[in-house]
Structures are given as C-alpha cells and as structure tokens.
Image: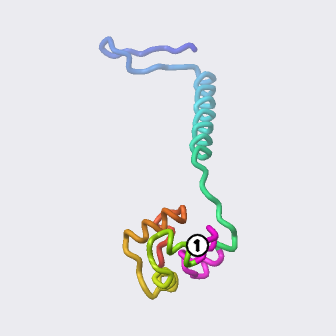
Amino acid sequence: MSAQIIELEGQPVFAVVPIAEWNALLERLETLQDLADFNEATAHPKETLPLEFIERRLAGESPLILWREHRGFTVQTLAEQVGCTGKMLSMIEHRTAAPSAELLHRLAAVLGCDMDDLHVD
C-alpha cells in the first residue's frame, strides 16, 4: 500500500492513499463486516414460528396458550413443570388471573421463550 503521511508538529495526523487503494480497502472492510454479521446471526439462530402461531397471536389469542401448544404441553403438564395448579394456569391463559413475576419467569424458562413473549395485551 502506498500512503502519504502528513504530519503536524512532528506527529502523523493524516494518511493519503490513492483512490483505487481506498476503494479496495472499503470493499475488504465491507466483506469482513458482512462475514461478522453472518457469524453473529448464525451463532445463536433465532427460532422461527409457524404461520398459524403468528396468525393466532395477531388475532389476539393468549400467548401462553400458543406457546404451551407450540411446545406440546397440556395445561396439567405445564402446570406441574412450573409449580402451579392446572386451574391457575387455565385462569392465566384465559386472562382471568395474572401470573406473578416469579411464575411468569418459570413459565418462560420451561417454554423456552422470553417473559415478554408471554405478555398479554
């Protein structure tokens, strides 16, 4: 690489390179950034959800019901996993009761999702 160094008071402050070399450097940097972005995206792949899940969620269905069914749990087995009753879980699913933060945390952990994913609007 050929660069002209410009100094100010004895200290290098600028490097001037031919435009062709500059463009080549930019292209290499963009390629490296693309590779880094790809590696980051594939290191922890995000789960994709079925279209039916998304459509039902957009229609306003309880996210807890959707996640429970998506993971293959019955009300009773999920309740046992998180340490509550089936009746309590059913009430939460049908929005007649709100889970405590601790129960919501346990539900998210068992269902393999974020607590925010279970937020009922």
Relative placement, left or right, of 27 versus 113 is: right
Please name the residue shown 60% across and 40% down the image: 39
Front in this rendered view, residue 85 or 72: 85
Q: Quadrant of residue 73?
A: bottom right
Q: Residue 11: horizontal and vertical position, in percent?
A: 33, 15
Q: From which residue to which does the magenta span run? A: 55-74
**Secondary structure of residue under mark 1:** helix
Please name the residue shown 43% across and 70% down the image: 104
Q: Quadrant of residue 102?
A: bottom left
Relative placement, left or right, of 105 versus 27 is: left
Q: Residue 61: horizontal and vertical position, in percent?
A: 58, 81
Q: Residue 52: horizontal and vertical position, in percent?
A: 69, 74
102 relative to 41, above or below = below
Looking at this view, name the residue that lies furthest to the left: 9
Residue 68 covered by magenta stretch: yes
Q: Which residue is mark 1?
A: 68
Residue 48 covered by magenta stretch: no
How many C-alpha atoms fall within 10 Å of the one at disc 1: few (<14), some, or many (≥20)? some
Relative placement, left or right, of 85 versus 25 is: left
Magenta: main secondary structure? helix
Looking at this view, name the residue that lies furthest to the bottom: 96
Looking at this view, name the residue that lies furthest to the top: 10
